Image (cartoon, rainbow, N blue to C red):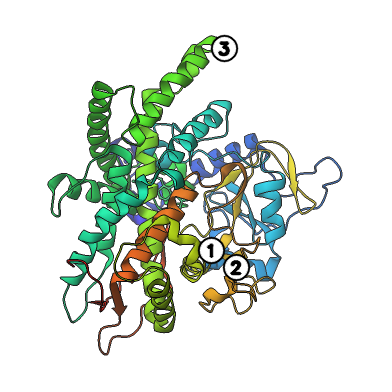
Amino acid sequence: MFTHLMSSLPPFLSSPLSSSSPAFLLFLFVIVAVLLIQINRRTGSSPAAPGPPPARGSIPCLPWLPVAGSLPWLGGGRPLHLLFCQLARRYGSLFALYLGPHYTVVVNDYQQAKEVLLQKGRDFAGRPTMVTTDLLTRGGKDIAFSDYSLLWKRHRRLVHNSFTLFGEGSGRLQDIVLSSVDALCVELLSGRKRGFDPSPAVTRAVTNVVCMLVFNTTYRHGDAELQEVIRYNDGIVETITRGGLVDIYPWMKVFPNRALSKLKDCIAVRDRLLTHKLEEHKASLSDGEPRDLLDALLKGQMDGGRGQRSSGAKDEGITDDHVLMTAAEAFGAGVETTSTTLLWILAYLLHHPEVQDRVQKELDDCVGSERPVCLSDRSRLPYLDCVINEGMRIRPVSPILIPHIAMTHSSIGGHSVSQGTRVLVNMWSIHHDTEHWDKPDIFNPDRFLNDQGQRVIPPCFLPFGAGPRVCVGESLARLELFMFLSSLLQRLSFRLPDGAPPPNLQGRLGVVLQPLPYEVVVTPRAGWKNSV
Ligand code: STR
């Protein structure tokens, strides 16, 4: 890491000491160490910070070095969620470590997660400042990464209200998904008969749905603007790995950094495109129904602005920047999470053809092949819902959620936690806890059904998080997953290419937990009357 760093140091740092000399390395190390110790003192985050009663216990904390934090003790290489599970077995379900300079408490157990997210949700609703997400969100003008504040709450409410316009009651999302599923089926059926990677087609279809929802644009296959959107989005996903280097070591941003410049380039492309859409929307905004999320946000911004002005705090309202960042985030989150979840579920269906058969039987019995599935069929398709839930349990797209920050002095499980401490909730370990789940590593959708065949949702199933920071797009995401999966399985069957091994289920942890690429063979189902 340091060799790479040295080779890219700016000229003013490489003189008078040669950038490759050991003396320079030592000099750099000492400067950084001193700085970090200072920062750490100022934030006052000591591992066993004595707190007011009743919380006086100290959380077991891994050793740390001023620069590398606890990382040298962690046995590198493993994805963080799995590493945390391993550490939880050694140190207990609640432990602390230094991620770089940041004292971080990790929660691995349902009761403690409930405390952090729900019972003391307000205490822990803060977000840390991170280099990459600050760039991505213009310093926290979004929902997911911005710190807790009154403005954030108002902004979040606006986004929530705008989302409900497209949810359950409106039928809008249903029509949008149905229109893009046709094209997806055609594309999947034209794939190589010997097997192909379904990921580009699925991502394209989901991107199309989200474009329609956010700025009311549909793209034809191969459209240049759609390609550009997919390219910049991929670039952001690739360079914004949560817990990645720059976010652990904020000082690294002063060095030339290829990932950071790529991220900046992608953000510039995104901003150009979205600003154009925003201007178009402003120019054509009418009093009627909002055409899309951007319209809804603009209308809400105007209403909210009025309320704001009357309370006297004029410049603290929801600005154009907020609207833009919300649209960008709804877009990024909508694409990444839904496409990844669909690809995980497909991967598991290839491992369990009997589950696919059972979903298709349920669809045949309840919907048939004469008409498309619609949202109102959902209550009659319990098994399909269970398959979606089991997919999100066994491979949550966000296995350690987004980091939380203690906004005040508080406690978890009787242990004191001082203000400013980072808190990570390891949802992976909660979703794989043998105390709550029978054979958690097995894909078994039936665990979401009771003896009478009705759906049950165990309380420790929290793929969208919970509390004040719960995913604001949860119900849209569930609707979209239902519409996509039901429509696909009604029309098509998925199987492994002859002789191919089933998909690797380990996954790769970046900003979301993605399946590794795999191949499928897609065939049309007999009886499906559509043109596909
Ligand atoms: C994906 C790429 C992009 O263009 C924009 C975003 C911003 C929102 C992010 C999203 C990302 C990845 C998935 C996130 C989402 C906010 C909530 C969601 C992190 C980086 C999850 O928590 C899974």
> Can the viewer see residue 27?
no
Instruction: Kindly identify which residue carries mark 1.
Output: 81
Compared to residue 300, the image places residue 9 above or below, namely below
Rendered location of residue 74, percent (x, y): 56, 65
Q: Are marks 2 and 1 in contact (CB under 8 Å)?
A: yes
Image mark for residue 85: 2
Which three-letter amino acid code belongs to the residue tagged 1? His
Compared to residue 508, the image places residue 123 above or below, namely above
User: How would you rate the neighbour count of disc 3 (Cα within 10 Å): few for under 14, some for 14-19, many for 20 or more?
Assistant: few
> Can the viewer see residue 324?
yes
Mark 1 Cβ inside 8 Å of ligand 1: no
Instruction: Kindly identify which residue carries mark 3.
Output: 311
| Image quadrant in which the N terminus is located | bottom left
Which three-letter amino acid code belongs to the residue tagged 2? Cys
Is 209 or 57 nearer to us in this picture?
209
User: Mark 3 falls on what kind of element?
Assistant: loop
Rendered location of residue 329, percent (x, y): 39, 41
Farthest residue, direction front: 370
What residue is shown at x 42% (from left), y 57% (from top)? 512
